[in-house]
Image (tube, rainbow, N blue to C red):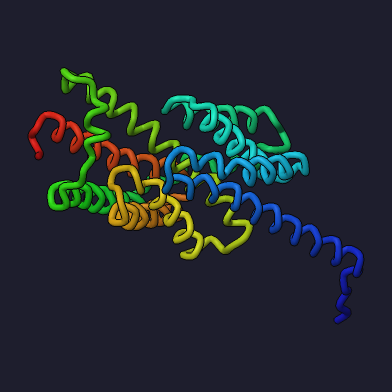
Amino acid sequence: MTVIEPAPAVSTAMSTQIATSRLESTLLFAVMATPFISFLYPSGAWWLAAPLVSAAAGWLILRGAPNRVFAAFWLLFLIVQLAGVPWPLSFVLPLVLAFVAARAWPAARAATSWLKWGALTWKVWQVILPTILVSSGGLLAWFVLWHPDVSDIVTSIPPGTSLAVFASIALAFSILNALWEEFLLKGMMWETLKTILPEGMTLNLIQSFFFGLIHYHGFPRGVTGVAMAAFYGFLLGIIRQRSQGMAAVVITHIFADLTICALLYASYTGAIE
């Protein structure tokens, strides 16, 4: 049998292309990681992230990197943070603009190929249901046993808010927050890491670490909260792998956010001290 070796020029060009792609993906990951780390510090830390994010994102966009729409998102996100755009617009607006651009920009559509429903089979539900029970039980235990100070969140609920009004707000928040966090972590970051690492445990551990970081000042909070959120993020990563889509992950996440809202309202009404 005669083996035909590839032409050296073709082989070299392919190796260079792969190396360039990995370099772009690694740089894009750095663009993503920097704002996440800023969640550990006061809002002024966004200014520290600005030079790296702006320069790296701009370079990726100008180069026409495959995932440049992700770089565009982080650049928009940084701009609205520095401009003081209030939540939830500061989170939702860049995401909407980035995805509109991705759909209208043919060369960038492949970057959102992960945005699919996925499977919701009984095998997937066998992972979803225990994850919901574990997360809701863990949040309740943390809140009741640790007695964390979440007064900054509770006092943001307007006085005299009825259960019906709060329930409507809680549902809207839970859906938007789940979509935002999962699109970033199980969508953008996951797809970027897939071009650097195999889609396995290491990839899942990395994204779950960043999921934990954004909860340092959230609910749950502190070092314990980061660890709890990271473990929960890892379970969501398993659901993402099993379902091969985003629906199962978002649905599971919504239940955790609804549990958080219920605990906050219980604290607001004095049902839980």
- In percent of width and height, residue 68 lies at 68, 41
Point out the image quarter for the N terminus.
bottom right
Front one among 4 and 25: 25
Residue occupying image coordinates x 22% and y 36%:
151
- In percent of width and height, residue 186 lies at 48, 48
Residue occupying image coordinates x 73% and y 37%:
107
Can you say whether 186 is above or below 158 in the image?
A: below
Relative to 89, 142 lies left or right: left
Q: Quadrant of residue 82?
A: top right
Relative to 68, 99 lies left or right: left
Residue 110 appears in the rendering = yes
- In percent of width and height, residue 142 lies at 19, 51
Residue occupying image coordinates x 60% and y 40%:
50
Relative to 2, 219 lies left or right: left
Point out the image quarter for the C terminus.
top left
Residue 123 appears in the rendering = no
- In percent of width and height, residue 36 lies at 48, 47
